[in-house]
């Protein structure tokens, strides 16, 4: 799925799947954060797993 739509920490996932941090909301680097998290439809997207900061997420699968 080639979808460039991004979602922010706290938003509800539009569909179930794996999401990955694209960038941090603060503008900080997310280079070390390549963790993918499984989120179910309607669940809130979490903070970045590595920095525990608000993040922009992108659906990867």
Image (tube, helix red, strand yellow):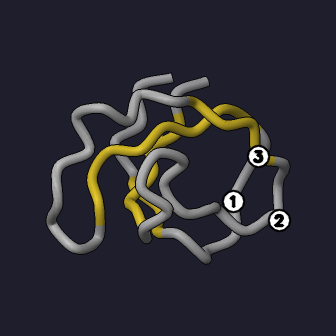
Percent position (x, y) of residue 1? 51, 23
Whole-angstrom CA distance, mark 2 to mark 3, is 8 Å
Of the image marks 2 and 1, the number of the one nearer the N terminus = 1
The structure residue drawn at horizontal position 66% and vertical position 32%, both measured from the top left corner, is 18
The structure residue drawn at horizontal position 26% and vertical position 44%, both measured from the top left corner, is 30
Mark 3–mark 1 contact, CB under 8 Å?
yes
- The residue labelled by disc 2 is 42
Nearest to the observer: residue 14 or residue 32: 32
Percent position (x, y) of residue 10? 61, 76
Q: Is residue 39 above or below residue 32?
A: below
Please identify the quarter of the rendering in which residue 55 is found.
bottom left
Whole-angstrom CA distance, mark 3 to mark 1, is 7 Å
Please identify the quarter of the rendering in which residue 19 is found.
top right
Q: Residues within 10 Å of mark 1 (few under 14, many from 20)?
A: many
Which type of secondary structure does the marked residue at label 3 adopt? strand
Which type of secondary structure does the marked residue at label 1 adopt? loop
Mark 2–mark 1 contact, CB under 8 Å?
yes
């Amino acid at each position: 799925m080639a979808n460039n739509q991004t979602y922010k920490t706290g938003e509800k996932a539009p569909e179930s799947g794996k999401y990955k941090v694209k960038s941090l909301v603060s503008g900080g680097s997310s280079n070390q954060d390549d963790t993918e998290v499984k989120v179910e439809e309607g669940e809130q997207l979490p903070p970045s797993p590595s920095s525990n900061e608000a993040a922009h997420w992108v659906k990867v699968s």
